[in-house]
Image: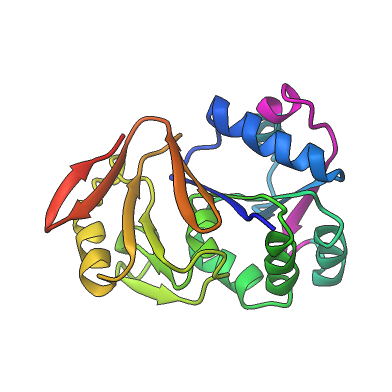
Amino acid sequence: MDTHLFLFGGGSLFTDGFASKFAKISLTLGGPVSILFIDRHTDYQDYLSLITKPLQENGLNHFLYLPLPTTTIEIAKEKIEKSAGIIILGGDTNKYVNNIVETSLADPIRNRFRKGVPVVGFSAGALISLDPCIISPKDNIERVFQVRPGLGLVTDVQIAVHFSEWEDKDHLYEVAKRYPDKENYGIDENTGLYLKNGQVERMEGKGVFRIIGGELVKCL
């Protein structure tokens, strides 16, 4: 069974090609798309519409909104286990680790992914999709390089998100230094990677960068 992972560097927009790709896979499987996010106790409908609009334009219309921890773990697990697509949004990465990776939600996400259900991560959602989950000093209140457990949907890749926007070159260099056996990518906002069976197959958006031979290289 092929696996499908989309990693976005931030923002809340699918690229046109990846919206079409994700929708096509989900429609083939049949079923709703679950959208997981940390509940900030604000009106999130306008924000979510930015996510769903391009998918609706490609034929997807059944979405399950799962704010955490407002939604109980048991209900979220039940919804995920019936999903034909999973989207994990952004925000405070540590909260996503606390409320998804380090709970019993992690296994149903992994299981659905292994069965061919496409998973999309935006920013924090992208970071927790990997293993380990590496958090930039610019993404935590301690302002330090953090390593936390991830979902491990892909294990041979590591990323830095909001790359150009956060001017996070030093963080990507540190990632490359600590994990020389993994492919490293700095991903700009409104930019994504598509990994099929754990391998980067396509890039879309504004900018993707890598540290290769000690040098920063622009790949997109």
Task: Indicate left or right for 167 with 24 as reference.
Answer: left
- Verify whether residue 155 appears in magenta: no
**Residue at the extreme front:** 1
Q: Nearer the viewer, residue 38 or 196?
A: 196
Residue at horizontal 62 percent and vertical 78 percent from the top: 102
Q: Quadrant of the C terminus?
A: top left
Residue at horizontal 46 percent and vertical 44 percent from the top: 201
- Verify whether residue 68 appears in magenta: yes
Q: How is the image coloured?
A: rainbow
x, y (%) of residue 12? 55, 37
Q: As displayed, is residue 52 above or below residue 124? A: above
Residue at horizontal 82 percent and vertical 53 percent from the top: 83
Magenta-tinted stretch: 53-70
The part of the image, by quadrant, that contains residue 71 is bottom right
Task: Indicate left or right for 59 with 135 as reference.
Answer: right
Residue at horizontal 85 percent and vertical 71 percent from the top: 74
Q: Quadrant of the N terminus?
A: bottom right
Q: As displayed, is residue 206 above or below residue 164? A: above
Task: Indicate left or right for 46 with 83 as reference.
Answer: left
**Residue at the extreme top:** 57
Q: Nearer the viewer, residue 199 or 41?
A: 199
x, y (%) of residue 21? 63, 34
The mark tally for this picture is 0
x, y (%) of residue 127? 47, 60
x, y (%) of residue 183? 33, 60
